Image (tube, rainbow, N blue to C red):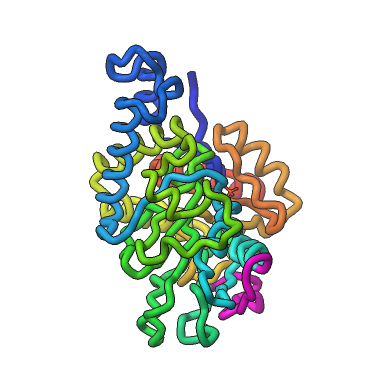
Amino acid sequence: MSRVWNFSAGPAALPEEVLRQAADEMLDWQGSGMGVMEMSHRGKEFTAIAAQAEADLRELLAVPANYRILFMQGGAIAENAIIPMNLMGDKRVADYVVTGAWSHKSQKEARKYAEVNIAATSEASGFATVPPMTDWRLSADPAYVFTCTNETIGGVEYPFEPDLAQIGRGEVPVVADMSSHILSRAIDVAKYGLIFGGAQKNIGPAGLTIVIVREDLLGRAMPHCPSAFDYKTVADNGSMYNTPPTYAIYIAGLVFQWLKREGGLAAVEAHNIAKAKLLYDFLDASDFYENRIDPACRSRMNVPFFLKDESLNEAFLAESRAAGLVQLKGHKSVGGMRASIYNAMPIAGVQALVDFMRDFAARRG
Ligand SMILES: *Cc1c(COP(=O)(O)O)cnc(C)c1O
């Protein structure tokens, strides 16, 4: 067996330790005589797996007691509809901060359920930056302010936490799509009304969506909101109103345990800073490659870069693949290359990429 360095944006690489444990437990989970995929979601074995996963996630993110953790399905794109269906209540307007492809898509979907006010957008910069909160123009009485705190496609990450108290609007809940950087750094959950993310970037398999929601925001769903997507129904049933994605929850739980063994989010964040610095410092020192994002807002997780001579793109991709470095092609809307370096990517993988890029530049520059 030989494993590659996988820079996929998602579904993405998982920690090898986690995959090995899952392989060991595939046929018989802890003497139960069953694999996890074969268990009833209401049986004592799976109930214990889900409860442990939730407790570990709560511990890692220091989730306050007045927040509920929901294990849902549908991914982040489904949440773009589920969120306004649940949070509009008796309000008319929802505010959106648009910083790239994902928040753009979110505001577009929300228009089916709400009047949307674009509170700020970085479109004029080609989505290369995050507008500072002092430039956000909130509407008079929004149900929430939506943010995407890491734009996976553009490679833009908030360099601050969107704390509306700093602009005198602390009463408005902040919603954050953290799909591609959840658990990559310590955050203050209390600054948000709702945090969500699909699991397949930085947590586990596709099929699981994590929602962390403040309790006072439950119970406001529109009458036509599907029951399986009504946060209060999901919360009241311990995420088992419908059958949850059991195997994805199990793998996510193994990832949470791995993160705890790694030292928790402070240690993981330090590791991610070192990985990102290695790659960005190399890009900045090079006259062969470039990153075009405002240095203050560069994502630690998703690093888009360009060869200055784009006629070499195909050769770069073919040779990197041959060297065991895969999934480096940039998103089609951006072009160039993108290296996604989530928690599961060790610094040795980033070093292997930098070594390859240096060698390629020396040969082709
Ligand atoms: C991947 C991604 C999505 C879309 O997730 P799906 O699981 O395909 O619905 C939305 N937002 C962000 C920030 C993402 O990275």
Instruction: Identify the residue at horizontal 51%, vertical 70% (top origin).
Output: 89
Using the image, determine if residue 329 lies above or below residue 310: above
Q: Position of residue 222 (x, y in %)?
A: 56, 62
Q: For residue 261, which quarter of the picture? A: top left
Q: How many marks?
A: 0
Given residues 126 and 195, the one toward you in this image is 195
Given residues 266 and 195, the one toward you in this image is 195
Is residue 336 in sight in this rendering? yes
Instruction: Identify the residue at horizontal 68%, vertical 65% (top origin).
Output: 112
Instruction: Identify the residue at horizontal 67%, vertical 59% (top origin).
Output: 308
Single out the residue that lies furthest toward the right. 311
Q: Is residue 296 left or right of residue 62?
A: right
Using the image, determine if residue 336 lies above or below residue 260: below
Using the image, determine if residue 261 lies above or below residue 163: above
Single out the residue that lies furthest toward the front. 223
Q: Is residue 186 left or right of residue 152?
A: left
Magenta region: 111-129
Q: For residue 165, which quarter of the picture? A: bottom left
Q: Is residue 51 left or right of residue 303?
A: left
Q: Position of residue 169 (x, y in %)?
A: 41, 84
Is residue 286 in sight in this rendering? no
Using the image, determine if residue 100 lies above or below residue 273: below
Q: Position of residue 21 (x, y in %)?
A: 35, 24
